[in-house]
Amino acid sequence: MAPAAMTSFVLVFTSVLVVRLSQAGSENSRPGGGNYDFVIVGGGAAGCTLANRLSEIARWKVLLLEAGGEEPEWSQVPAYSSYTLTPESHIDWGFRTAPSPLSCGGVGCVYPRGKTLGGSTAINGMFYVRGSRQDYDDWRSLGNDGWGYDDVLGYFKKSERNGNRTLAATRYHGTGGTLDVNVFKYQDVNTRAIIDALVQYGLPERDLNGEYIIGAAITQMISFNGARRSTNQAFLREARKRSNLEVITMAHVSRVLIRNRNQAYGVEYLKDGITYRVFATKEVILSAGSICTPQILQLSGIGPADVLKPFGIKVVADLPVGENLQDHVCSTTVTCKVPRTSQMPNITSQFNDFLDYIYRREGPLTATGSLQIAAFFRPENTTNDDAVPYMEFTFAPTTPEGNLPFCYYDRIYFVGILQKPLSKGYVRINSTDPFQPPIIQPNYFEEDQDMRRMVEGIHYALDIIQTPALQNLGFEVDMEPISGCENYTWGTDDYFRCGIMMTTRTNYHPVTTCKMGPKSDPTTVVDSQLKVHSILNLRVIDASIMPTMISGHTMAPSIMIAEKGADMLKHDWGEDKIKN
């Protein structure tokens, strides 16, 4: 089938699916002013979790403001994740990084971030991978008491409803939460073969959220019965039935309201061209993520003075907001053809797959093809199970046919993902207009060790492809030169460096732009209670507070941060006796 025809087919049936799937959203609250106990900005991984937990206190009035709209039903189809990660989905902010000669082909990278209820949990790959014990013990060692692994494990478990009986029986998993965590229902022949290859290469197959993270797995995902389980669905939809919780969508927050130069008392937001103000009698909580949270703070006068003053913004608190940006950088330099095990069905098979999903929640559309495997490698090839990995591989399906559901593919990117980058970047406002995107400069590969480790990772990928498990299925490396790298010899480190620079991608894990730590540390923005330094009644509760980049993925830790932050708020405001 021609690319245009196949894409049209998919779009037609996507529109049918939108109608067919049950509608579970709620009507928006009417915009306007008013007083609330808590105003939460951002309805993503952390914001939806917080809205649920804070509204458990019936006497508290809680407002959640989200810049996007309701989560669309079609985004719940796992295989349709290929569509959610594009600006055309209308549930993505459409960000792009600033150009750099060291990455993204010199023109900047597309930088997807969710703009809908559920935030990036409504558009991501759904991986539920928490990170290693050492990651959180490192947080504690930086002066963040209460954030070591043993301190936070209970908050991971509190959210989780793990559907695997074997895993649920261990000390590492929970079953009483509302966030469904399951392995996808469907695996094709390539998925199982890649796991076998990783084991042959020397990685143990194990629970990546258990005692150790070094290893490989068909990964646990936020999913249930063949569908995505975003934080909107897991935490917010039922909570919206509570009379003390209001949710306003399409509400773009422009700034935090601050009086006496040190006390937050509300926020200003825009909706339908009208500016509104809402007031918090207790606290304002920013949960807008590692890009939008620093933008809002800077527009409010909280940020580096040398960034704010040129825009005429009065400096309320000179803090390193937006600095220290870290991200899991990755590249698609190595592509493997799978001619013998291609997953490109004819139109009749696609139609049957569609019906299988609609009526039984079964079949290829319940999964993301080969993109349901994660493999974490140990540093310097040591054999310590408890070592912190510096490289991850995922296996992204692709095809020259165009942007299709992830379950349909005839090639696989061996995506190398740097877990502990040394390079740091920044997020800075570009205008006083809140609708203008900030400057996002990750500075990928500013530290050459990051590039050296990525090149080393490519050699790992090539070795994995040569394992019997993949060779027996006819996997073959695509040696067509990457555009822009034709002058280098394929297989040399110089070629791989060029390939990494030309195919740089984000793995959608920006963190650390509002770094947590003691006030004595000049690189920090919030303390270990998530309170913004020098500002009363203002907290940041989202991925931006992570003091260092974790190994793993950032969604599960973001939810954990919100669970822990909610308990901090309940304690500080005398409502911590509720059963958790």
Image (cartoon, rainbow, N blue to C red):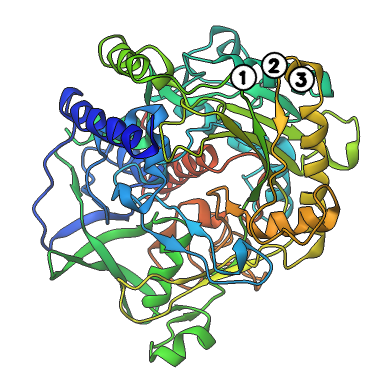
How far across and down, in percent of the image, does residue 122 sit? 37, 39
Q: Amino acid at mark 2?
A: Leu
| The quarter of the displayed image where residue 296 is located | bottom left
Residue nearest the viewer, comparing 31 with 108: 108
Q: Report whether residue 129 is seen.
A: yes
398 vs 534: above or below: above
As helix, strand or loop, the secondary structure at mark 3 comes to helix
Task: Identify the residue position indicated by label 3 in the image.
Answer: 471
Q: Quadrant of the C terminus?
A: top left
As helix, strand or loop, the secondary structure at mark 2 comes to loop
How far across and down, in percent of the image, does residue 6 sit? 35, 32
Q: Amino acid at mark 1?
A: Asn
Q: Residues within 10 Å of mark 3 (few under 14, many from 20)?
A: some
Q: Amino acid at mark 3?
A: Gln
Cα separation between marks 2 and 3: 5 Å
Task: Identify the residue position indicated by label 1 in the image.
Answer: 190
Task: Identify the residue position indicated by label 2 in the image.
Answer: 473
Q: Residues within 10 Å of mark 1 (few under 14, many from 20)?
A: many
Cα separation between marks 2 and 1: 8 Å
* 1 or 3: tag closer to the N-terminus: 1
